[in-house]
Image: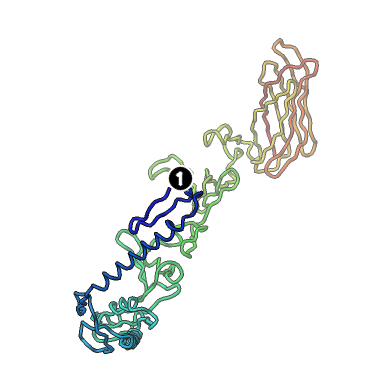
Amino acid sequence: MSSNTPNLGLLKKDPMVDGNETFNIETMLNENWDKIDEAVGQVREELGNIDVDIPEASLTEKGIVQLSSATNGTRENVAATEKAVGQAFQAGNERKAEVVAALIAIGIQASTSETWAQLIPKIGAVIRATGNATAADILAGKTASNASGPVTGTIPVLTGTRAATGTARWPDGALAVYPEQGYQKGGSGDGEIKVTAAQLQAAEPNLKPWHYRSDVNMFGLQGSIPIRRPDIDSHINADGNRVSFGPYSTGTSVPYLYLGVPNGYLLEGVEWVRHHEPNLHSGNVKNGVSMFNGQLVGSLIDGVNSAKYATGSVTVTSNQTSYLFHELVINTLTFTPKLVICHMATTGWSKRNGTAFVSTDYGAFSSRLAAQDSFGSDRGGSFSLSGYTPRANGFTVRAGLSEDNAHSYTLTGAILTWLAFG
């Protein structure tokens, strides 16, 4: 559908609606051109009647401005020419170069390629020296300035591991270390202070080798307390120089055996302190006398001692129903036995007993059991010794007790008594 423009009223056609209409040169071209020409003529006429009065320009008003090439003037109603701008720019570069040179002269990095926005903060950072620091307050090799001018530091810079000049002890026991005078960055490497063992001992008198174990090294000091390690059965030998026998206190007659504990550190697991006394055995104790809570029972019989005599007994058990066996090992004698007599008697209701002997010169002899059960019947059987081996401090022999196969009863146990003669 056709429409008109808002200002000149020019005719417009809508291609979607009027697309099939015949193009009208009069309405679509000629009339539109006439309207445009008439509007242009009116504008020209109106412009010719305008009388414009343009004032001179100022800082507050727009207007006509005069050009000037001066670079040192003070007027504010003229405009700079290209020449004046170029001269001013050149002068600005020269001043920038002077400023950059001045900054570099006092140790501040600067360049003419930097803008004034970059240089101005550097200029503002320049402060007139007013400090009171002296060379003794500044690190060696570093420079500064005070009100009197430049200063070169003299404080030594310490590198590497340094030795402590001394040590002391605080009232609470803490260690005080005296470092060298100078600057040290701290930490590992260039910050380490070495304290010798002698300096530690000077600060702590109790840091002595004889105060701790010989397998411990503290700050280069090896301990000297001996370590007493247990041997068989977690025992440790007593100090042989400090073994004595006497009363508990002066004026008393009750005897005590004193074992000197050896100097040193006792490792965990040590249960006993012992002392070997070869003469402390049953053959040197009166027969029937019990010592050490029954652990040593004497076997010495008056009038027989010169014959080198000893005796003892053991309990024999077995899971067999008709046979008891025991290997008797004696190693506490003070002589080599020439004759050993053994007697075994059962402890169950089926009574059995027998006697046999062994001799270095004659071998082994055994007797038939006198075997009786609870009904008084003879059940037979035998008792024998074998494998006899005499030694300088005792002997070994194997004892066997049995009943005949036709009359087997459970042998619950037996007492084996032995006698040895030298």
Model colouring: rainbow
Query: Taking 95 as reference, is 315 above or below it?
Result: above
Please state the horizontal and vertical placement of residue 31, each as a whole percent of the image.
Answer: 39, 59
Please state the horizontal and vertical placement of residue 88, each as a whole percent of the image.
Answer: 31, 86
Q: Residue furthest front?
A: 26
- Name the one closer to the observer, 177 or 14: 14
Circle 1 sits on which residue? 246
Q: Residues within 10 Å of mark 1 (few under 14, many from 20)?
A: few
Q: Residue at x 35, y 83 (%)?
A: 107
- Name the one closer to the observer, 22 or 287: 22
- Name the one closer to the observer, 21 or 76: 21
Identify residue type, mark 1: Gly
Query: Taking 73 as reference, is 312 above or below it?
Result: above
**Residue 421 falls left or right of residue 175:** right
Residue 82 lies in quadrant: bottom left
**Residue 394 falls left or right of residue 248:** right
Q: Quadrant of the C terminus?
A: top right
Residue 105 lies in quadrant: bottom left
Q: Residue at x 55, y 51 (%)?
A: 229
Residue 209 visible, this angle = yes
Residue 350 lies in quadrant: top right
Please state the horizontal and vertical placement of residue 148, each as a whole percent of the image.
Answer: 24, 86
